[in-house]
């Protein structure tokens, strides 16, 4: 296969996966967060007997059902792509990826689907308490689904708890609890679900603000805003806290991603955190993938603090990582060129091992297996042609990170002001407030997508960190085929999104039943 | 319990409001396109389609890992 065709397949497959994942994640966060708020509303109704909470829940449940039904199974298209476009990757990750996804499919999804029926159709057919338990179980089921997916994703960012089998070319689970309990998985799970709660709170406040603008269902809107603002405020606080733990995890396991997020070329002790700046091309830099941040406003030593909770900690920049460095924790990482050489030894050893086993040469097999094990941590580097291939798209990661954080700060303001004005029954008195709340709905979706761009583009070129670069993961299929299915997915998902928005808007216009 | 859940589903689906019927049609069309058009016709699992046994699949991927060209 020619180099050009190969690049084309990789690029089209990446675009296809990115587009599908972006559309899929437009449906997911509202399911995760709104199910939580529905459970809270129903609990308030059961405990206080106030029917206004019941009517509020029934209205938001309709929007939840539309989002849940239209979004359901959209993630399966990602799994189809694993099998068709990313077959080397699917085989290589083996049961590490298969086990969490199977648990997700069998346990969490069925739990969610079963109790969804009781929650949606079971009014007057089951007791109040059983209905309430079902609503909570829908929330728990959807969030457990997210846990397994995010555990699998976290393993790709920080592969732990497995052993590579050179006879089958698969990674086999050696320690399930190491995979499930890895700090990367935990911080990713809590950061993702709490950001989904934040998005849902923005959605509820924004839709309620529309009722206030229209001067309809005012008390329903005020109650919804009060609940969502408190829920959103605590959610965004936890999102910030887990963002901090994520930053520490990235510092330790994906230093290049951190350097890209910051546009940091040369690191050092007491590294500054750039609040805003423009990453520009710079001819004087050793790689055209690198950028110099111009017009930057920085907080001194803050990056070191975010990375290690130590203002004087050493943070490596892009050049340090390329040339080799010793981390703040005292671990020495060789240059990328050295790691490429190690990786090539590991790949060659894999080939020799296969031949030796087939020929029954036990001595050579043992020798090559030793070499493979010794250099396996640099296995993926063996496929690189130039060290600077490990630098991701710096401007995209840099801006996405800042948009995500900036919008997160905006949501803190939204929740605080919404709570204050709703409590004073003054939400509609200041015209800017309902419009501000409405604008925060798309902003919440943008923040979510930016978070995923930081996570996924920031780890390029790796599909499995340090072990498998993207171009090795690909199936040798025709790029024209991938292009065709790309456009088919784009049309399908766009139609689904239009249908969701259309049906939702018609139900929002109908409004809730007044207490 | 499963019988009861089934009856809840059955009764609920037979008395869907208009908006929910529209959602149900959209979902049915989506699932048909996903599972029949995409999964069966356009995006079959490459390894399952091309190789019969796990050993053959392993050998193929091993070969890919050993010989994959650098970009």
Image (spheres, coloured by chain):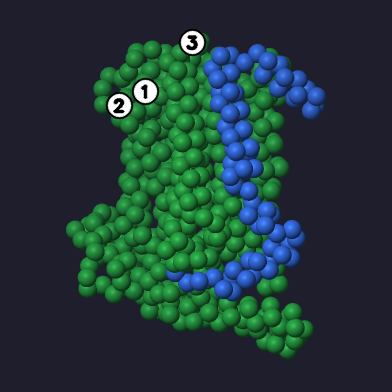
Chain colours: A green, B blue
**Placement of A377 over or under A493, stated as above or below:** below
Structural distance between the alpha carbons of marks 3 and 2: 24 Å
In depth, the one of A181 and A476 nearer the eye is A476
- Image side of residue A318 versus residue B51, left or right: left
Indicate which disc, 3 or 2, sits on the residue closer to the N terminus: 2
Residue nearest the observer in this picture, A304 or A337: A337
Residue A19 makes an appearance in the image: yes
Task: Tell me the SS state at disc 3.
Answer: loop
Q: Is residue A144 above or below residue B21?
A: below
Between discs 1 and 3, the one toward the N terminus? 1
> Helix or strand or loop: what does disc 2 sit on?
helix
Instruction: Assess whether mark 3 and mark 1 are in contact (beta carbons under 8 angstroms).
Output: no
Q: Residue at x 28, y 58 (%)?
A: A274
Labels 3, 2: one chain = yes
Q: Which residue is identified by label 2?
A: A435
Question: At 38% across and 66% down in the image, what residue appears?
Answer: A391
């Amino acid at each position: 296969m020619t180099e050009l065709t190969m690049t084309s397949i990789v690029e089209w497959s990446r675009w296809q996966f990115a587009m599908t994942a972006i559309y899929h994640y437009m449906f997911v966060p509202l399911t995760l967060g709104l199910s939580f708020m529905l459970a809270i509303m129903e609990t308030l109704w059961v405990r206080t007997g106030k029917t206004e909470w019941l009517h509020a829940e029934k209205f938001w449940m309709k929007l939840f059902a539309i989002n849940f039904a239209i979004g359901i199974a959209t993630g399966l298209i990602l799994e189809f792509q694993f099998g068709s476009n990313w077959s080397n990757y699917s085989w290589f990750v083996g049961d590490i990826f298969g086990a969490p996804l199977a648990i997700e499919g069998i346990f969490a999804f069925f739990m969610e689907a079963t109790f969804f029926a009781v929650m949606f159709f079971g009014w007057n057919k089951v007791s109040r308490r059983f209905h309430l338990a079902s609503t909570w179980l829908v929330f728990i089921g959807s969030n457990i689904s997210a846990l397994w997916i995010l555990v699998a994703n976290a393993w790709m960012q920080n592969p732990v708890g497995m052993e590579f089998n050179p006879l089958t070319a698969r990674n086999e689970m050696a320690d399930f609890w190491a995979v499930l309990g890895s700090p990367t998985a935990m911080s990713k799970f809590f950061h993702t679900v709490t950001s989904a709660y934040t998005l849902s709170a923005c959605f509820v406040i924004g839709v309620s603000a529309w009722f206030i603008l229209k001067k309809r269902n005012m008390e329903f809107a005020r109650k919804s805003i009060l609940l969502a603002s408190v829920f959103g405020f605590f959610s965004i606080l936890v999102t910030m806290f887990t963002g901090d733990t994520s930053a520490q995890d990235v510092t330790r396991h994906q230093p290049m991603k951190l350097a890209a997020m910051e546009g940091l070329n040369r690191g050092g002790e007491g590294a500054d955190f750039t609040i805003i700046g423009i990453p520009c091309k710079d001819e004087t830099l050793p790689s055209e993938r690198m950028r110099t941040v111009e017009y930057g406003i920085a907080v001194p030593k803050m990056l070191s603090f975010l990375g290690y909770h130590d203002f004087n900690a050493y943070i490596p920049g892009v050049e340090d990582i390329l040339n080799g460095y010793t981390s703040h924790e005292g671990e020495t990482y060789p240059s990328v060129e050295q790691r490429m050489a190690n990786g090539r030894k590991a790949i060659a050893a894999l080939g020799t091992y296969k031949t030796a086993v087939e020929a029954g040469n036990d001595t050579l097999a043992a020798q090559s297996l030793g070499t493979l094990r010794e250099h396996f941590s640099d296995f993926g580097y063996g496929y690189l042609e130039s060290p600077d291939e490990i630098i991701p798209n710096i401007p995209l990661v840099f801006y996405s990170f800042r948009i995500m954080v900036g919008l997160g700060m905006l949501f803190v303001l939204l929740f605080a002001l919404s709570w204050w004005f709703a409590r004073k029954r003054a939400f509609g008195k200041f015209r800017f407030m309902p419009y501000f709340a409405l604008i925060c709905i798309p902003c919440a979706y943008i923040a979510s997508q930016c978070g995923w761009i930081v996570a996924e583009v920031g780890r390029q070129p790796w599909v499995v960190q340090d072990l498998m670069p993207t171009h090795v993961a690909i199936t040798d299929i025709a790029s024209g085929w991938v292009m065709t299915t790309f456009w088919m997915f784009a049309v399908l998902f766009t139609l689904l999104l239009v249908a969701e928005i259309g049906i939702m808007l018609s139900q929002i216009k109908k409004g809730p039943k007044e207490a | 319990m499963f019988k009861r859940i089934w009856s809840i589903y059955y009764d609920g689906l037979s008395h869907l409001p208009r908006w929910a019927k529209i959602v149900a049609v959209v979902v049915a069309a989506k699932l048909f396109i996903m599972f029949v058009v995409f999964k069966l016709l356009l995006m079959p699992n490459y390894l399952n389609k091309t190789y019969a046994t796990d050993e053959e699949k392993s050998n193929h991927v091993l070969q890919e890992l050993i010989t994959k060209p650098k970009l």
